[in-house]
Amino acid sequence: MSGQLNKVCSYEQIESFFFHDMTLMFGGFGGVGSPPTIIKCILDWGIKDITIIGNDTGFPHIGIGQLIAADRVKKVIASHIGSNPIAGRLMSEGELDVEFSPQGILAERIRAGGVGLKGIVTEIGHDDPYLNKGKKKLEIDGVSYLFESALTARVGIIYAKKSDPFGNLVYDKSARNTNPLVAMASDITIVEAEEIVESGELDPEEVVTSGVFVDHIVPSKGVDWKWIWE
C-alpha cells in the first residue's frame, strides 16, 4: 500500500454525500449487484425525494425497491418496474414519476454520461409516440433517429466482489451488470465491497473497473435476510 491512496472508509464517513432531493445512480439487476448495506443506511438516514437511475426498481424488499416501498423516491429512470408492484401502484396513482428507457438505450445513456458525451442517437423508438415524446428527432442520411440524452448522477452506489484499497474492482459473474457504467457516470462513486484485499493481490486481468472511477470504499455487512423479509 506504500504510496497508494487508500479509499476505504466507514459508513459514517459517507453519510454526508446523501441528502434530500438528490440524484442517485445505482448498479444492480433485480437487486443482484445492488449494495445492500448502503441502501439500508440510506433508509436509516431518512433520505427522501430521491431521483434514482438504474436498470429497474428491484423488489419491494430487495435492492433499490426498498427505497420506493418506504416512499423515499420521487422519480425513477429505468428500463422496467414490473418486479416491484409498489412502484407500479405509485406510478398509476401519480405519486411516482417514471421515465422508461429501453434497457440497451438506458445502458448507453449511462455509458455516454461516463465518457463525457451529451447523448446518443438511435432508431429505437423514433416511431413510438410514447418513447419519442418530448425528444429531439434527427434525420441522418435519410433515416429518422431520436436523440437520447446522457445520464449522470451526483452519487453512484455500486457493489463488487473484491476491491483493493485504491478501488480496483472485481465483480461476481452477472452481479457485474450495470455497475461498471454507474461507476463512470457518477460524480462521486461509492463501492460496497464483499472483500477488501491488499494492493497487488488482484490479478490485473480480472479487474473490470479501474480505481480511478472510485472515490470511496465501504466494507459490506452482507444481507440480513431476516431484516429483508420482515
Image (cartoon, rainbow, N blue to C red):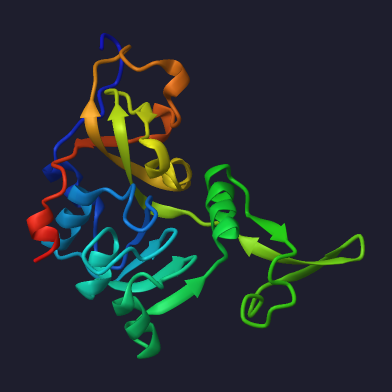
Q: Which quadrant, please, contains the N terminus? A: top left
Nearest the eye: 168 or 33: 33
- Image label count: 0
Residue at the image point whose x is 23% and y is 26% from the top = 196
Q: Residue 102's x, y, as percent?
A: 57, 65
Residue under the point 18% across and 34% down: 9
Name the image quarter holding residue 134: bottom right
- Judge whether 153 appears above or below 129 on screen: above
Compared to residue 203, the image places residue 40 above or below, namely below
- Outermost residue on the top side: it is 2
Q: Quadrant of residue 24?
A: bottom left
Residue depicted at x 42% and y 34%:
213
- In the image, residue 136 sits, relative to residue 88, either above or below, namely above
Q: 101 left or right of 228? A: right
Task: Give residue 118's position: percent from left, percent from top.
Answer: 63, 54
List the single residue furthest toward the right.
142
Question: Residue 72 in the image: x percent, y percent?
Answer: 24, 71
Q: Where is residue 208 in the image (x, y as percent from the top left)?
A: 45, 30
Q: Is residue 163 above or below residue 175?
A: above
Q: Which of the pair 37/165 is nearer the observer? A: 37
Q: Is the C terminus in the top left, top right, bottom left or bottom right quadrant?
A: bottom left
Q: In the displayed structure, does residue 185 sit left or right of residue 223?
A: right
Name the side, left or right, on which 156 lies relative to 55.
left
For residue 135, what is the image quadrant? bottom right
